Image (cartoon, coloured by chain):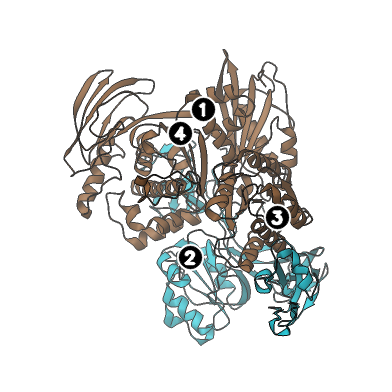
Amino acid sequence: MAHAYTPGLRVTPQTLLQRQRQLPLKGEVVVSQGDSVTRDQVVAHTHLPGNVTTLNLVNILSCTPEELPNYMLKREGDPVEADEPIAETRPFIKWFKTTVKAPISGTLESISKITGQVIFRAPPRPVQVQAYIDGNVIETLPEEGVIVETTGAFVQGIFGIGGEIWGPLHVISQEPEQILTPDQIDDSCANKIVVGGNLLTLDAIDKAREIGAVGIIGGGIRDSDLRDLLGYDLGVAITGTENIGLTVIVTEGFGPIAMARKTFDILSENNGKEASISGATQIRAGVLRPEIIIPESSIHEQAEESDHPGLIEGALLRVIRAPHFGQVGKVTALPPELQTVESETHVRVLEVEFDNGNRAIVPRANVELIEE
Amino acid sequence: MDNLNVIIATDCGSTTTKAILIEKKDDIYRQTYRGEAPTTVEAPYEDVTRGVLNAIQEVEELSGRQILDGETIITPAEDHRGVDIYISTSSAGGGLQMMVGGVIQAMTGESAQRCALGAGAIVMDILASNDGRQPHEKIERIRQLRPDMVLLSGGTDGGTISHVVELAEFISAADPKPRFGSGYQLPVIFAGNKDAAQEIERTLGDKTALTVTENIRPTLEAENLGPARHVIHDLFLEHVMAQAPGYRKLISWTGAPIMPTPGAVGLMMQTVSKRQNINVVGVDIGGATTDVFSVFEDIFNRTVSANLGMSYSVSNVLAEAGLADVMRWVPFKIDEADLRDRIKNKMIRPTTIPQMLEELQIEQAIAREALRLAFVQHRALAVGLKGVQAERTLSDVFDQSEGGESLIKMRDLDLLVGSGGVLSHAPRRMQTAAMLIDAFQPEGITRLAVDSIFMMPHLGVLSSVNEIAATQVFERDCLIYLGTCIAPIAQGKIGAPCAQYEIGLPDGAQSGTLNIGDLMHFPLEAGQEAHLTLQPERNTDAGVGPGRELNTTVKGGTAGLILDGRGRPIVFAENQSERADQISRWSETLDLYPR
């Protein structure tokens, strides 16, 4: 391949961001292009079709499916109330009459002459989509949703669980190397997004959840803690729908690992400001990473997005696999020829100088650019 | 299509688009150049043809042949310009995702599953009248999954109508929306009881894009998967592919219908099996999924293990196999919490490669378990038809078999082919051979090969237009023969004699005793052959019956001949340190890793 794949996570103090807010089905958009919206404001709503309940009447009425229409009191499309009679037999002796009542309130959707199945549908369920971030509606997608734009700080994490949530950032750790301890989490963390530097332990997450924090952010998490937190072993990284009481985002990976200095500094500088976060992660085609968005209260002029120069000498990177896992450094050389590493794999490599001055040769596939 | 001299073929995978050039020289087709580029189905490009053009451009640069005129593929070929045909396969955008339905789960349900898998689909769920779920649960499930296509079967011809119509009613009630494009109807194929077709039409005709085709299970004794598979391929192109970004343009470029990648690989496997008259098992282990293909006695089967893979799904391999089964393949101990973190880090950063030897060994241990589990799943589906009335004699009274015996008979397996990053790019070919042997545990004489650059999809679609070209390239350029595994089926104590061998190697005959628990290695290069005599012990079977002498010719390869006396299944020492010694000894015999 012409280019080494260096997946980069974006970490930037100010950028222009757009988020598409879309309904699962067509519905009504309730804001207009140019409107200013807040994170909890509903921008579109619709109704999802109600749940379905089935009833096989031929067994109850002791008739054949073809005879079924003769016994029906309601027709396809009729509204029904729960316990309302919908079918009955008409025997000579009234005592032997069998009456079937609707199991739910809703609509009688279909009566089958082949199977004897009668299908009821509950009333539609309302669904709303909120703006998620403070910003401006720059485009409406008719009947589907809107695109909201904002400027502000933006941090992509590597892995998260839990859905979209917002609240003020509450940075506790003084340094990115510090591990957040449960005793540092007190009542002042309620309804806030707690930020630690290094590992998020299960004890710390539990304490945050107990206090009522809406989110927690750190450098790493142990997989064994994640398993205890979820109650199951996460096999495939598709997350965002967990219901564990708060949203968890780690910025670096699994195990004890300090948050990248730049990420930590951005979060610290925005301490106390309102942030919108999402733990949704999907690591397959169409990668989705968890994110932290801190919109500016006053919308600045559009910040120019510069094209990322890619993997060049001097670029800031993080090693993402053993033996230097988690270390941050700068590219010092990019030898073009393939080299053989300890495992005897022939790979394209680069030379990196770490913050402590040590240098190492690392496969290019094992680094991640930290976008500035 | 016999006058093809220059062929360009691409496979648009989820992450990479691979192009190969095939040229006819001196009446023989050879694969000459290849190029690859990132697939461009996702944002920001959202046009698959960009990646295709980039990959073809790389072939142009390497070969010096002009293939593109701007964004047009030049046809036909003249001297150093143009090609005679362009063909392609695709698995981009998550491949073809299907839901299937049948009346009885183990009968029509399973036939529908085999049909969809064989066509190259991922089966998201199997709906059946007897699947134990309540109607509302089934309806909710159909609605949630948003498949690309539904295959509904059920009822033998003249059999039940009501049960299959009931399934159609559930589909209708769910009113499912397809994954791509909100403006078109979900394709549904009905391949069940022909007497139910009219009712199915009435139930689903308005709400879905319904196609009725021949019953996949016209009688309990027969399966007829071909017609429904063809419909799946047609609908895949018309509906699913045509909705994906750029595919309309791509379809207009190709000289033959675009095939789903695994469907094309399956076609190639069948072609090879037919032409060489051999039984074949093939495996493609990817980042997210592992596909297993088999052709035994002309019956083709394919399964896809959707959550067994080496990157996105690596964590699931550990969850399914368990730590002990993974770690039994490595000679060192590692802290469980640390290993779990390492594996999760591979999951969230799937493109990394093992730099340290220890990491490579762990990765190859995980691969063995992923392959083993995928093969277990394959054996469970590659079975004879269930529900078939067999004539039973008095001796069968105590045999509770209900039909459905596995078609996979390891001692009849002739060729085992591996592909996918962890197998194709292993630093030493011997590592590939060892992973294949440990995971599949072939019995008797089995030839091993690896598809070095994953060319089988291209050749599969090529075989649909020119079978000779496809098989010539397959035999000459696609496969790298690793050698032959010779594994007598032995029982007994570790260290006890298993068989006497004599191998007529080109540089002199070698003879001796193979003991139980031992591996032996004899170099024999690709293209070379050796005569083998194996006299097994009384209770040991070399493939021709217990205690019977085997005389045969075996073929070499980059890994040579491997005599495997470790038993089936492989017997591990129970004691941790003895097991570590065992693994180290096997590794040293095969020279698997640098010391």
Horizontal side of A117 relative to A176 (left or right) equals right
Gap in angstroms between the C-alphas marked 3 and 4: 35 Å
Q: Residue at x 31, y 21 (%)?
A: B530
| Residue position marked by numbered label 2 in the rendering | A259
Task: Decide if residue B503 is in sight here.
Answer: yes
Circle nearer the viewer, 3 or 2:
3
| Residue position marked by numbered label 1 in the rendering | B274
- Labels 3 and 1 positioned on one and the same chain: yes
Counting from the top left corner in percent of width and height, residue B323 is at: 35, 58
Chain B drawn in what color?
brown
Q: Chain of mark 2?
A: A
- Labels 1 and 4 positioned on one and the same chain: yes
* Label 3–label 4 contact, CB within 8 A: no
* Label 3–label 2 contact, CB within 8 A: no
Counting from the top left corner in percent of width and height, residue B572 is at: 25, 49
Circle nearer the viewer, 2 or 1:
1
